[in-house]
Every structure is written in C-alpha cells, then in structure tokens.
Image (cartoon, rainbow, N blue to C red):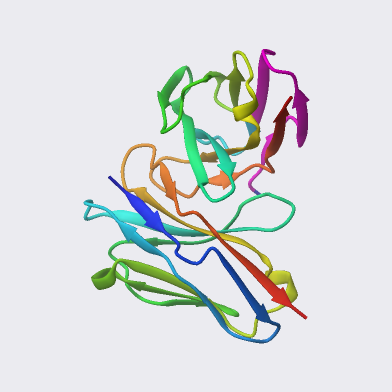
Amino acid sequence: AQKVTQAQTEISVVEKEDVTLDCVYETRDTTYYLFWYKQPPSGELVFLIRRNSFDEQNEISGRYSWNFQKSTSSFNFTITASQVVDSAVYFCALSEAWGAQKLVFGQGTRLTINP
Amino acid sequence: DVKVTQSSRYLVKRTGEKVFLECVQDMDHENMFWYRQDPGLGLRLIYFSYDVKMKEKGDIPEGYSVSREKKERFSLILESASTNQTSMYLCASSTTGVGTQYFGPGTRLTVL
C-alpha cells in the first residue's frame, strides 16, 4: 500500500528564514508521481509541483526548491527567504502512474511565517 | 485556466437530512474525485469516477454515494447525514495520463 508521511505537524519561523518541509513516502510501484500542494487560509488546494519517479533532478522555481531522493524515499520542499504569504498548510502526495492516478496525501504541515 | 467549482462554501444541515454536494469542472477531465479533510488526517479519498456513470470506492466510502451523469459534474450524496460527517469536502479533477489533480475551493459542512 502507498503511504506518505509528513512528520512535521507545525513549523513556525521568522520572515526571511529558509525552511524545509519533509516528506517521506512508501510504495511498491517502480513508476509513480509525487506532488506538493499548498492550502492557504482560503481553503483551496493549489498545485505546486509534480515529479515522476524517473526524474531525480532537483527543481527550483523562484524561492521554492524540491529535493527528490529515491534512495531515501524522500521529496523535501524548501522555501528560501520565506515571506508571510507563504503561511499555509502544505501537503505532499503520491500517486500511481496508471489508471485514475489516485492521490495518497500526507497529513500536512502547517507553516507559519511571522513578520 | 483550470476551473473546478463547488456548489457551496459553507453548509449547515441537520442529522438525518439527505445532503447533496455538487462539483463542476470545465476542463473536459475524465477523472473526478471527492475527498474529505479532517485535522491531523490529511485528505482521504471518498469516491472517484474515471468516466461518466463509472464510479469506484475510495478509502472511506461508508455513508456516502456519488453520481456522475455528465462528464463535467460529480455529485457527492450523504444519504442520512450524521454528526461525524462534519468536515471539509474537496472535489478534484484530472486528465488520464497526466495525473495532476486540480481542486475546487471546498465545502465546509456542519451537521448538527
């Protein structure tokens, strides 16, 4: 069975600090996808990134970066120079590569950026 | 731009009522999903549909049913609402082969 663990329930940092959100997953599939979503206070989940299991290159998008390591089954998310607008709940998720590609979510990490 | 809409942002119902939550997507996606979100539990899949009139149970289908009569619309039905169904309900859609799910704004349902 697939499983995603986000061990950090809540993180609080001061603005401009760097922060890393951890995500560890379990799957028996050799082909799969990993995702990060952001849920701001408004409630809607916003898609941030999708990674397939064959692509272990790190990705950077502005202040956001993602570190995918198959050897440790981890897909960590780093925000550099955090801002108050980054405050949200962040979810890591895993899907199969075939069929309807259902998502299995982690429990989420609530990130608070203090001014 | 992708768009998933849900019929209500907030809903209050009484125990035993029949409740309909509607979801509409305008992206011609084959797949649609219903999740519920509870503190500390993340999002859990209730039901999903991969085609019109097709549906499959997710991880927590008990107490729920679904209907998909048109490709763009996916309804979640609580046959007889109970207080333990108080939750945030999120709808999503995706296209087969790509996998990225796009979410609606959510419906916060309170059952009294």
Residue B30 appearing in the image = no
- For the C terminus of chain A, the image quarter is bottom right
Where are the magenta residues, as a range? B2-23
Eyeballing the image, is A101 above or below B109?
Answer: below
Residue B77 appearing in the image = yes
Quarter of the image for residue A23 reads bottom left
Residue A24 coordinates in the image, percent (x, y): 36, 64
Residue B112 falls left or right of residue B71: right
Residue drawn 74% across the image and 52% down it: A42
Residue A94 coordinates in the image, percent (x, y): 39, 53
Residue drawn 67% across the image and 13% down it: B16
Quarter of the image for residue A15 reads bottom right
Q: Is residue B22 magenta?
A: yes
Residue drawn 49% across the image and 54% down it: A107
Q: Is residue A44 magenta?
A: no
Q: Nearer the viewer, residue A28 or A60?
A: A28
Residue A14 coordinates in the image, percent (x, y): 69, 83
Residue A42 falls left or right of residue A23: right
Residue A101 coordinates in the image, percent (x, y): 38, 42
Residue A43 falls left or right of residue A54: right
Q: How many discs mark residues in the rendered view? A: 0
Q: Nearer the viewer, residue A13 or B72?
A: A13
Quarter of the image for residue B72 reads top right
- For the N terminus of chain A, the image quarter is top left
